[in-house]
Image: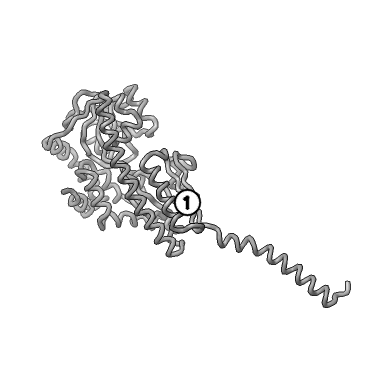
Amino acid sequence: MKVTPRTRRQVLATAGVMAGSLALPFMASAQSPIVIKFAHVVAEQTPKGQGALKFKELAEKKFPGRVQVQVFPSSQLFGDAKEMEALLLGDVQLIAPSLSKFDRYTKKVQVFDLPFLFDDIDAVDRFQSGPQGKALLESMVNRGLRGLGYWHNGMKQLSTNKDKLTRPEDVKGLKFRIQASDVLEAQFRALGASPQKMAFSEVYQALQTGVVDGQENTWSNIYSQKFHEVQKTIAETNHGVIDYMVVTNAKWFDGLPADIRKGLSEAMTEATAYSNKLALDFNEADRKKIADAGKAKIQKLSKEDVAAWRKAMEPVWKKFEGDIGRDLIDAALKSNK
């Protein structure tokens, strides 16, 4: 075919249309929102579940059309055992595991598992918002994890199927369910008790059938899982804390535009305050529901009782002081007032 000026113009025009159509997907993708998958393992109505939804609301309000947060509760994407790996592989961008899950990445975070370290949740707050607590959020960046905030579950109480639970000798020889944690294992061994690592979902039946004699948990967990129905006594020990750290993939987060990073951090701060207030409200309400149910007796500890428990726990503090650091332990103690 003879190429005339007219046919040349037609060819070029056709090529332009094709080039333009090929460019459209790339133009569209450049304008696509940043998708953030926030996966967690609890129900939506829990403080953590509500905190995740609040973060979604705040982040999307700050960046309409630029950020989209997808929340996956109740292990819809990944269960307890797989969520950390999924985060490191980039399959999700945010998770909020229990603090006990981080000891394989930094031993310093074990400070939160030390028994009778914090007097109450306010002391935990003061430590977490102080310089040492904030430094722990950054302590795993070299392992690919960046902490964005601490979310409360609450202070732990101790329960058993026995009538008395005020002093350390009352638990000697008993079997207790624990989370997988070297500190928690050492805690019960120091008391002459037998720690049993067990999935949370298996605890009710284990208590009901006597596979274990007792457990430690927050008021909200005890009530929601009906542990008070299969335990005789709950001691109001406040002996430890069950909290979460909201973490992201450090490389992914650090690669975001600066304004997005700043805005997401602000949204996380606000969502943290919201979730933590909910956790406090849940625990207060659920303690009352347990008391009103009258199935398990709630025992308060005297100052002398608490002193006896703290004395019994001294070997645990000494055992882990080298890994955690005396400076962190001292900072935690100073948060008590």
**Left or right: 88 as drawn, with respect to 197:** right
Q: Quadrant of residue 219?
A: top left
Can residue 147 be seen?
no
Crowd tier of the residue under label 1, counting other residues whose Cα lies within 10 Å: few below 14, some 14–19, many 20 or above: many
Query: Between residues 261 and 178, which one lies in front from this camera angle?
Result: 261
- Residue 161 in picture, x, y percent from top left: 26, 24
Q: Quadrant of residue 155?
A: top left
On screen, residue 162 above or below 224: above
Q: Quadrant of the N terminus?
A: bottom right
Number of dots carrying numbers: 1
- Residue, x 13% and y 38% (percent of image)? 307
What amino acid type should be assigned to the residue bearing mark 1?
A: Val
Can residue 232 be seen?
yes
- Residue, x 68% and y 63% (percent of image)? 22
Query: Between residues 185 and 146, which one lies in front from this camera angle?
Result: 146
On screen, residue 181 above or below 147: above
On screen, residue 139 above or below 313: below
Pick out the residue farthest to the top: 209
What's the colour scheme?
one colour
On screen, residue 244 above or below 63: above
- Residue 271 in picture, x, y percent from top left: 36, 50
Q: Quadrant of residue 287?
A: top left
Q: Regarding mark 1 in the picture, which secondary structure is present there?
A: strand
- Residue 333 in picture, x, y percent from top left: 18, 49
